[in-house]
Image (spheres, rainbow, N blue to C red):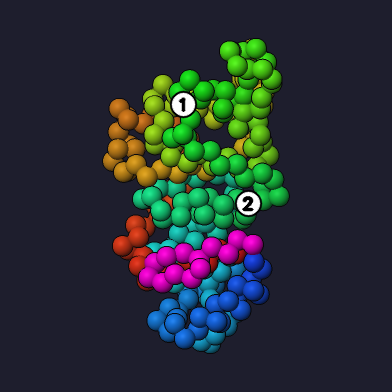
Amino acid sequence: ALARDGACIALNVLPHELCDALISDFQPHLDDMPWGTDELGYRDNFYGQQTKRLHGLFSKSAKMQDVLSIVARAGPTDANVLITGENGTGKELIARQLHRQSSRSEQVFLAVDMGSISESLFESELFGHRKGAFTGANDDRLGRFQAASGGTLFLDEIGNLPLHLQAKLLSALEQRKVTPLGTDKSQAVDVRIVAATNVAPDVLRDPQQFRPDLLFRLNTVEIKVPPLPESVTDATLVG
């Protein structure tokens, strides 16, 4: 569906040519929606203007164009990225674009909702476990770090992680190794971390709420997604 005034169009299964055709169908309704300029190459849109497209993300909002410019620069690097912004502003879409722009694009992109993982299962979920490690561990299981090795691990809602679990995550990031429950043998992992949070910046930088050393590891690059009221003239297409 196509939405105006700051909404998004999700066309994940269509090639750009079909997206363009669909956009043309809505031409009479889009007179007030010029698109921005192109990061990766220019083409004329149906108004003879120029369109900004970053692997399927389109935007006419100046603030979102700034975000896409950071994505274009940071994507090809292997730097960890922290994406901040309110709920519903498209943080995971941006994370996926970073992955598509990276040298890991042919490898897995694995998203993990950190807020949905119980404290008792944190290590098992992220680092894996061996059969018999605890009641109910009937088989060996890979953790999210091992499953995403070679690709990108997206840690959503990272700001909700309790301090004592932040220390375990920090250790994995520093050592680039994880130790599954039920064994003392560590395993090397090669993941790029993209994290996201809706926690306010002042809270995120409060050492009583979030470890500064973990924040340092996560925000090699920080992308601040503007709130919806600041991008009400924006239209985004994901192809």
Q: Looking at the picture, tell me which residue is in the foreground, 78 or 105.
A: 105
Q: Amino acid at mark 2?
A: Ser
Q: Is residue 58 above or below residue 121?
A: below
Q: Is residue 49 visible?
A: no
Q: Looking at the picture, tell me which residue is in the foreground, 7 or 74.
A: 7
Residue visible at 49% across and 61% down in the picture: 68
Q: Is residue 199 above or below residue 126?
A: below
Question: Which residue reaches farthest right?
Answer: 106
Q: Looking at the picture, tell me which residue is in the foreground, 118 or 205.
A: 118
Q: Secondary structure at mark 2?
A: loop
Q: Is residue 102 above or below residue 123?
A: below
Q: Main secondary structure of the magenta part?
A: loop
Q: Quadrant of residue 97?
A: bottom right
Q: Could you give the CA–CA distance between mark 2 and mark 1, rounded to whole angstroms?
A: 31 Å
Q: Is residue 51 visible?
A: yes
Residue at the disc numbered 1: 118
Q: Does label 2 or label 1 sit earlier along the sequence? A: 2
Q: Which residues are magenta?
A: 1-13
Residue at the disc numbered 2: 102
Q: Is residue 42 left or right of residue 202?
A: right
